[in-house]
Every structure is written in C-alpha cells, then in structure tokens.
C-alpha cells in the first residue's frame, strides 16, 4: 500500500444484477473476468490497496459473495433493506461504520478503476475536501469520497439513486483523471468480456 487513507471504504455489492442475468441464477459480481479473477474481488482488491478498512455491503442470501469479499480482506455486512436499492445499501454501510472519519464509496461491479484514481480521491478527502469525485472526459464516475459532515445525509438515503441528489446539491471537488475505468461497470456478459 503506497498511500494509506484515513477514510473507510464502502464497497457496494448488494445489487441484483438483473441486466447481467434476468433469471437471477448467476451473480455478476462472482463472474470471472478474462484473467480469471472474480469481478467483486478485483474491485475490492483495488480499493484495499489505498483504504485499509473496507466494509462490503451485500444483500442477505449472498453467502458466496460475502465469503469472496471477506477472503479479499473486506469486512462484510448484510444489508436487510438492500432490495430497496443502492441508497438503502449505502445508508446501511455508513451507519455500520460509525467510527469513520470519511468514506470512499466504490461499486463492486467496477473492477477497472485505476488505483491511482482511488488514491487521488483519498488524498483529496484526507486533505479536507467535503465531497470528491473523479471525472473522465466530462463525466462523473466512481469512487466518490464523502467527508464526515455528510454522515447524517448519507444515512437517510433510500431507493435506487444512491447519493446522486447529495452530489447535485453540494459543491463537489472535481478530479479530472485519465481513467476510463471510473465509468466502466459490468452490467451485461458483453461488458465482462470488455473489462
């Protein structure tokens, strides 16, 4: 670990991945990338290279995913309200990390974010930024850093929009990065072939 952030990582891994497998038999986060690494393991590994404490939020019944993320080095929590969407999962992760000084929120279906991007977000957050987000070619991506002053707002999130409203209502420190990985998630089997 070249840089160790003071923030707590929150890895959101509680989605249903219905576009990847409409029948719900295969969890996209357990799918293997071309190099044989499971999607969620790679996303966790990259976050853990910068943030020493990562809390992975999974939905109840995702025992194989929970084991994989635990083996990767994450603490794992089951979010009972995960079916309500990303906002509810994020709120659960924030509430479960009450000793955090700030959070770096990443998505488990985004395994190609450069470690240098995660480090840039962490350094800005640790340096006093309130909200930090990376941008690639004008588009905001992940991970996003949130300072402690946003704890209450993050804990009230619900539904499937995550922290989008908070990001639109607050001043965000913009980090322009040369990293298309901040926008590339795995939503379909075709995406998996292209990561």
Image: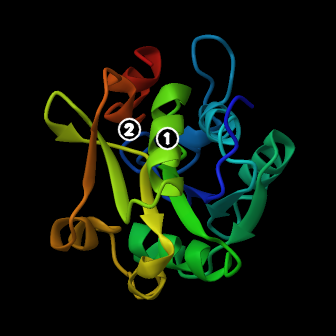
Q: Crowding near pointer 1: few (<14 within 10 Å), some, many (20+)?
A: many
Q: CA distance from mark 2 to mark 1?
A: 8 Å
Which tag is nearer the camera, tag 2 or tag 1?
Answer: 1
Report the quarter where the N terminus lies. Answer: top right
Using the image, determine if residue 191 lies above or below residue 173. above
Colour scheme employed for the rendering of this structure: rainbow
- Residue ID for mark 2: 187
Describe the element under mark 1 as helix, strand or loop: loop
Residue 64 vs residue 120, the one in the foreground: 120
Name the residue carrying label 1: 109
Dot 2 lies on which element? Answer: loop
Given residues 128 and 157, the one toward you in this image is 128
Picture layout, residue 112 above or below residue 70: above
Residue 163: x and y, percent? Answer: 33, 68
Residue at 76 percent across and 62 percent down: it is 76
Q: Is residue 178 left or right of residue 21?
A: left
Question: Is mark 2 in CB contact (under 8 Å) with mark 1?
Answer: yes
Residue positioned most to the top: 35
Comparing 49 with 148, the one in front is 148
* Picture quarter with the C terminus: top left
**Residue 31 point in image, percent of width and height:** 60, 31
Up the image or down, 173 lies above or below 48; here it is below
State left or right for residue 109 relative to residue 27: left
Report x, y in % for residue 105.
49, 56
The extreme left residue here reads 138
The answer to whether residue 67 is above or below residue 31 is below
Of the image marks 2 and 1, the number of the one nearer the N terminus = 1
Using the rendered image of the protein, determine whether residue 113 is visible from the camera's viewpoint: no
**Label 2 packing within 10 angstroms: few (<14), some (14-19), many (20+):** some
């Amino acid at each position: 670990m070249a840089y160790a952030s003071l923030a707590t990582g929150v890895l959101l891994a509680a989605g249903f991945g219905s576009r990847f497998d409409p029948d719900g038999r295969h969890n996209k986060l357990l799918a293997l990338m071309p190099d044989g690494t499971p999607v969620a393991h790679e996303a966790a590994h990259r976050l853990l290279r910068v943030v020493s404490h990562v809390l992975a939020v999974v939905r109840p019944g995702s025992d194989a995913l929970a084991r994989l993320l635990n083996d990767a080095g994450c603490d794992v929590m089951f979010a009972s309200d995960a079916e309500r969407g990303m906002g509810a999962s994020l709120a659960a992760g924030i509430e479960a990390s009450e000793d955090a000084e700030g959070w770096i929120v990443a998505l488990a279906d985004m395994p190609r974010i450069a470690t240098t991007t995660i480090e840039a977000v962490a350094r800005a957050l640790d340096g006093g930024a309130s909200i930090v987000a990376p941008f690639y070619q004008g588009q905001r991506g992940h991970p996003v850093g949130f300072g402690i002053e946003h704890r209450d707002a993050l804990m009230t999130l619900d539904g499937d929009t995550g922290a989008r409203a908070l990001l639109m209502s607050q001043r965000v420190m913009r980090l322009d990065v040369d990293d298309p990985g901040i926008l590339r998630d795995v939503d379909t089997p075709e995406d998996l072939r292209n990561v």
